[in-house]
Structures are given as structure tokens and as C-alpha cells.
Image: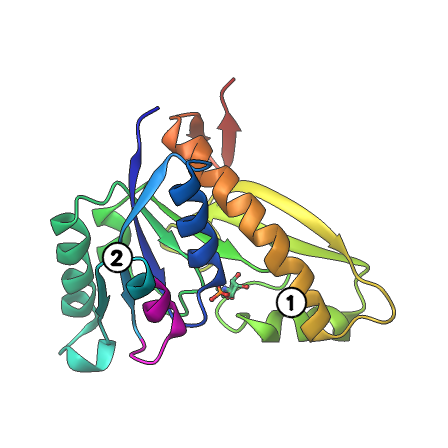
Amino acid sequence: MRILNVGVLVSGNGTNLQSIIDKSETGELPAHVVVVISNKSDAYALQRAKNHSIPSYVVRPRDFVDQVSYEQKMIDILNTHKVELVVLAGFMKILSSHFVQAFRGRIINIHPSLIPSFCGKDFYGIKVHQAVIDYGVKVTGATVHFVDENVDAGPIIIQRTVEVKDSDTAETIALKVHQIEHEILSEAITLFAQGRLKIVGRRVLVEE
Ligand code: GAR
């Protein structure tokens, strides 16, 4: 099968990145992580990239005059490495239409809730799981979706649920959700690599 060139954007720990790297190295995933970009210089995800000899870059908005030149730098890096699919894996920056247009239909994001619940610009990382506990929902989960101009609003590729038990805390939910994130992110990348995802309006159809 053809191996897809993947570029991963990160901001933090990078367990999703690690999962993609590990599965691509064993051949479970028809993808190769060719580059990692972080907006934070202290993101542990950068170390994970180095451990696997994957080129990594720190690109910080504050080092650029505006959002477009910041995003253009990332676009140039991704193109230099011949990236076919951009994966936002714990990337905590909102991208403008400049970036989205450069990779339209070729950017996916993993979000730690069942979109359209607990998503949008104020919902990221552990905050999402605390909001889940505070609201009292009985199930939560994770979503992989295509990225468009609106935050956490692009067509949904895969969702999976986890149960919220009385004993759960934001931290235990985060652990459970991380586990299913790693599963559905690699499933989505595989479907994309196989050319089986078809966007029809808001829906993503999976071709047999
Ligand atoms: C993941 O739970 C991911 O879904 C979330 O950040 C975490 C990163 O974990 N992303 C967002 O909240 C984006 N809105 P990781 O660095 O261990 O992969």
C-alpha cells in the first residue's frame, strides 16, 4: 500500500504523535511522519520526534509580524517535506483561512469530546474533561474531523464514546479518552491514506 507523508502539528505532550509514530514504524499505519511542528519550544512532543529522528521545528506566532506570515512559515515547512496530510494532534492554536486554503481537505484534528458538545475556542485539553464532569453527561468521547475555517466545526470522520462514571475525575476521563483518541486517529489516517473518505456537505462518507 502507498505510504502517506504526514506532518504533525503539536503543542504539548504528544501521546497522539507517539501513537502515530509507533504504528507507522510497525507498519500498522500506512503513513510516515515526515515532520513535526510545535508552537511551543518546551513541548515534550519535540523530544518524541527527535527520539525517532523526525525533523522538528518550533514556529511561534510571536516571532512573526502577523498570523499570515506565521502560518506561511508552517506551510513552507510542510511543503518542503512533501506533506500530504496535516494532523493536528494536541495543537492548541486556531488556524486561519490562509492555512486552511493551503491544505483544504487535507487537515484533520483530534478533539477530546463528542463534537458538537464541549468544543470551540474555549474547550481544549483538560478543560474539556472538567466541563464534561461539571455538566454531568454520562458519555463523552473523542472526534476526528476535517479542519475548516471554523473552530472544531469541520466534517466529522470518526467518533468514539467512553462512559462517565460517578468516580471519574477530569484526569481519569482524560486517560480513557486519550486511549480512544489513539485508536480513532490512526483509523482516520488509514482511511485517508486509502482514499476512502468522501466529503459530502457536512458528512464524511466512508467508501467500501
Ligand atoms: C488531546 O486530548 C487532544 O484531543 C487535545 O489535546 C490533547 C493532546 O494530547 N486537543 C485539543 O484539546 C484541541 N482542541 P497529546 O499531546 O498527548 O496528544
The answer to which quarter of the image holds residue 190 is top left
Magenta segment range? 40-48
Under tag 2, what secondary structure? Answer: loop
Beta carbon at label 1 within 8 Å of ligand 1:
yes
Q: Residues within 10 Å of mark 2 (few under 14, many from 20)?
A: some
Residue 114, can we see it? Answer: no
Residue 52 location, x and y as percent?
A: 31, 57
Asked whether, in this view, residue 95 is left or right of residue 92, the answer is left
The residue labelled by disc 2 is: 54
Using the image as rendered, state which of residue 39 and residue 20 is in the foreground. 20
Residue 161 pos. (x, y %): 70, 49
Q: Is residue 66 above or below residue 158?
A: below
Q: Quadrant of the N terminus?
A: top left
42 magenta-colored: yes
Instruction: Tally the numbered discs.
Output: 2
With respect to residue 156, does 166 lie above or below?
below
Q: Nearer the viewer, residue 5 or 72?
A: 5
Which residue position holds label 1? 174
- Residue type at mark 1 is Ala
Question: Does residue 119 show up magenta in the picture?
Answer: no
Name the residue: 39% across, 73% down.
44
Label 1's element? helix
Q: CA distance from mark 1 to mark 2?
A: 27 Å
Q: In front here: 49 or 129? A: 49
- Decide which of tag 1 and tag 2 comes sooner along the chain: 2
